[in-house]
Amino acid sequence: MTTHAADRTPALHGVLAEFDDPAALVRAAGRAREAGYTRLDAFSPYPIEALSEALRLPRTRLPWIVFFGGLTGTAAGYGLQYWASVMAYPLNIGGRPFHSMPAFIIPAYETTILFAAFAAVVGMIMLNGLPQPYHPVFNVPQFAAASSDRFFLLIEARDPKFELAGARRFLEGLKPLGVTDVEE
């Protein structure tokens, strides 16, 4: 027996609540964490520092990625100069030493900045899961306002505490502008 695409019921991704101001979103996120929901996501047209705290997001690893990118840049820049001046092409110019540390510092500093900047960009893109051309919330018509003036809180269906009717009731109790089921 064959099943057709039209016969399949779309899987539920979660429940989405829409708010009209950032304070309401932060309060809702905090209340959802207090209620025991752990798989939450929030969408806002601009960064809200209090939202990260309300969602209890873990600290980012990006500073470590940038730090090790900078260390790699320092080693690469200094190592390249050392290899070129001391090992591959040693030139005795005016009796100066082959390994001249003061002359190597500035280019090594520049490669530190270059590698750290590249590590920051690549690390940020990878940690944010970009590029992400599709997300299930894009199917919700109201979500188009997320980039201009609306704030959204999503309780994902894979949350251990998630139960559709209970999650809807909980979000409706937070007095949002609307609550919508999000399908995959």
Image (cartoon, helix red, strand yellow):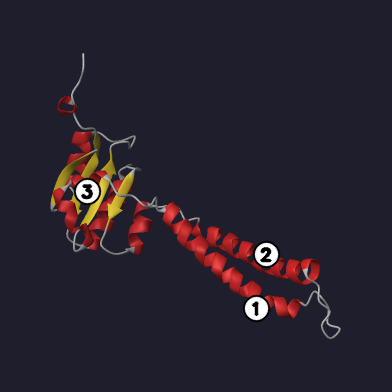
Residue, disc 3: 138
Label 2 CA crowd tier, 10 Å (few <14, some 14–19, many 20+): some
Circle 3/circle 2 CB separation < 8 Å: no
Q: Secondary structure at mark 2?
A: helix
Q: Position of residue 19 (x, y in %)?
A: 18, 56
Q: Where in the figure is residue 95, as x and y percent of width and height?
A: 86, 83
Mark 1 burial class by Cα count in 10 Å: few <14, some 14-19, many 20+: few
Most extreme residue toward the bottom, as rendered? Answer: 94
Q: Residue at x 60, y 69 (%)?
A: 112
Residue wearing tag 2: 75
Is residue 147 visible to us here? yes
Quarter that holds the N terminus: top left
The Cα atoms of the two marked residues, 3 and 2, are separated by: 44 Å
Q: Nearer the viewer, residue 41 or 6?
A: 6
Residue at point 54%, 62% (across, down): 66
Q: Residue at x 47, y 58 (%)?
A: 122
Left or right placement of residue 173 versus residue 126 in this view: left
